[in-house]
Amino acid sequence: MRMIMSVAVVLALALAPAAINSARADDMDMKNMDMKNMDMKNMDMKNMDMENMDMEKMPMKMASPADAPVIPAVAGYAEGEDIMFLHTEASDRKIAKLLSDMMGSPVLHVPSLALTPADMLANLYVFANGIRPDGPMGPLEFQPDVFDSPPGHAGYSPLRKIIFVRWADAATPRILKSAEDVTQAEADGRISLETSAIVVNMPMLTWPGGRR
């Protein structure tokens, strides 16, 4: 009897490590299986979200806070059409104050805008003389500004280099509504252009064929 019990104890001790290792392996397999299941669930949720987004096709609209500031829009021209834009920052202190007073909304003075590389700037034509319109006008109280490269065109940038336009004394001023009009008028000797180092941030609100 004692012999049988001794043999049983020896066998139990011999098998115990294998049993423990087997249990550990099973536990690791369960953990790995759980991780795989979790990954699959996460992937399914991501796929489901993407499918829902594709089905909706419309982004969720968020309401603006009731006390959100309103920045007044400015009138201008691009490609022969009326457009609207904002001016929010300027590299020149005097221009920043002029634009702030013009619209009753602060335009921040940011000198570092003048360091913007030339290939990141679009052009803005500001009229220093010429026609004084009854309606919207530019910052110097002559015709509204003219933009080149509106959104959707090569060279578009909200950062604009100011180019001052002056009509020649012998020329008869008229309203110019496109960069091509300005270029042609210069070629004809009717206007002169003065490129400044002033840069203004001027995102467009509307443009030919588009709007925000």
Image (spheres, rainbow, N blue to C red):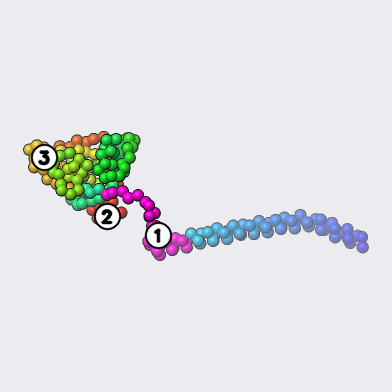
Q: Which label's residue is closer to the chain start, 3 or 1?
A: 1
| Callout 3 amino acid | Arg
Q: Residues within 10 Å of mark 3 (few under 14, many from 20)?
A: some
Would you identify the image quadrant in which residue 94 lies? Answer: top left
| Callout 1 amino acid | Met
Q: Are marks 1 and 2 in contact (CB under 8 Å)?
A: no
Our reading of the magenta stretch's main secondary structure is: loop
Residue 75 point in image, percent of width and height: 23, 49
Q: Please tell me whether mark 2 sits on a helix, a strand or a loop.
A: strand
Question: Who is closer to the viewer here, 183 or 198?
Answer: 198
Quickly name the residue at label 3.
Answer: 190
Residue segment shown in magenta: 47-73
Q: Quadrant of the N terminus?
A: bottom right
Question: Who is closer to the viewer here, 177 or 107?
Answer: 107
**Which residue is found at the position 15% from the left and 48% from the top?**
134
Quickly name the residue at label 1.
Answer: 60
Q: Please tell me whether mark 3 sits on a helix, a strand or a loop.
A: loop
Residue 28 point in image, percent of width and height: 66, 56
Quickly name the residue at label 2.
Answer: 210
Would you identify the image quadrant in which residue 130 lies? Answer: top left
**Which residue is found at the position 74% from the left and 56% from the top?**
20
Q: Are marks 3 and 1 in contact (CB under 8 Å)?
A: no
Q: Which label's residue is closer to the chain start, 1 or 2?
A: 1
| Callout 2 amino acid | Gly
| Distance (Cα) linking label 1 and label 2 | 21 Å
| Distance (Cα) linking label 3 and label 1 | 51 Å
| Distance (Cα) linking label 2 and label 3 | 32 Å
**Which residue is found at the position 15% from the left and 47% from the top?**
133
